[in-house]
Amino acid sequence: MLRERVREPTSERPILLVAHPRACSSAFERIFIQNHQHVDCFHEPFGDAYWLGPERQGERYEEVRGSTGLAHLTYKSVVDGIKKMCELASLESKRLFIKDMAFFLFPSPGQEANIAQSFGQTNPEPQNPTMLPRKVLEKFHFTFLIRHPRLSVPSYYRLSLPPHKDRSRVREFDSSDLGYSELRRLFDYLRSEELVGPTIANSPRKDSPDRTSSSNNRVEICVVDAEDLLNRPDVVISAYCRSTGITYDPNMLHWEKRHDQKRAASIINRWGFDIYFHKTALDSKTIQCSAQRKGRDNELSYQLWIEEFGIDGAEVIRNAVESQLDDYNHLKQFALVV
């Protein structure tokens, strides 16, 4: 298959793929790490500020933050670092691709949203749910990755149990950590501010809102469902590349060589130690279809959870799944059609 040279991108802004935990986002990122002729990748930079810096919102890595060399990073300094990486990528005629968690842009659960102090902004933005000013958000080309909670929630719950919890540092399962709410609120805010949309990437579908062909230079709404990615990676990634203006190369979907693996590990493990969340993606050699996809069925899912986690664990998972469905379904209506 020949490489597909897409139209000139609507924007040279860095692409920011935002996701919720356990949405196969590291696998998605791994594809673009492989496309290094056209893309430079920056792995979860806002996690530096969220987990490690003086404006940190989470405590998961409190014991090791000092050893990372990144504990000084504020949200403003992360944005400045992204700008520098964009400039370096541009010198090589590349685009910067960033993968991050949507909730890294938000205050910790239950806290009021305010712009991070490091930006020195005094005027409030009451409609903005994030810690980044609108003038910063508009510098990014946002795309979105979702996964059905019947698949993501048990995956996250598993990380809170022995023997995984010591390496994942997920001390206990909390449904407020699942990230669907933050992803939806970010999406809705960007859409209301016309920073994405109104057109939706890929072919028209009558039952979805605003699904028309793009005829202007605004950023299309580009939402990818992880199960579509696992089922048809070539079709999904090709469509994603068309929407974002990246050159598609089918060789992006395979990474068997040792030097490819070393390059990916150097990009993803920036903190100087392995992050257990990314182990599967780093151990892989291509996009792997999951046998758990059959878990979309309610009763079968529940039986599988009982077998692995017991009745009490299965109930916790079922309740958590139900609590995320509204946000997932809202985003799903905008997903790429494949």
Image: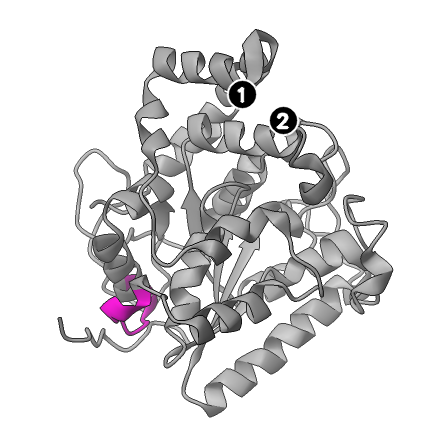
**Residue situated in front as seen by the camera: 127 or 31:** 31
Q: Is residue 73 left or right of residue 209?
A: right
Relative to 180, say whether 120 is above or below. below
Image coords of residue 93 (percent x, y) = 41, 87
Residue 63 within the segment the image draws in magenta: no
Q: Residue at x 54, y 46 (%)?
A: 186
Q: Residue at x 64, y 34 (%)?
A: 177
Residue found at x 43% / y 47% = 145
Q: Which residue is mark 1?
A: 323
Q: Position of residue 20 (x, y in %)?
A: 53, 42
Q: Would residue 260 be found to the left or right of residue 250 on screen?
A: right
Give the residue type that dot 1 points to: Ser
What's the magenta region?
A: 243-252
Above or below, 308 against 114 in this view is: above
Badge 1: few (under 14), some or many (20 or more) residues near its Cα, within 10 Å? Answer: some
Q: Amino acid at mark 2?
A: Ser
Looking at the image, tell me whether mark 2 or mark 1 is earlier in sequence order: 2
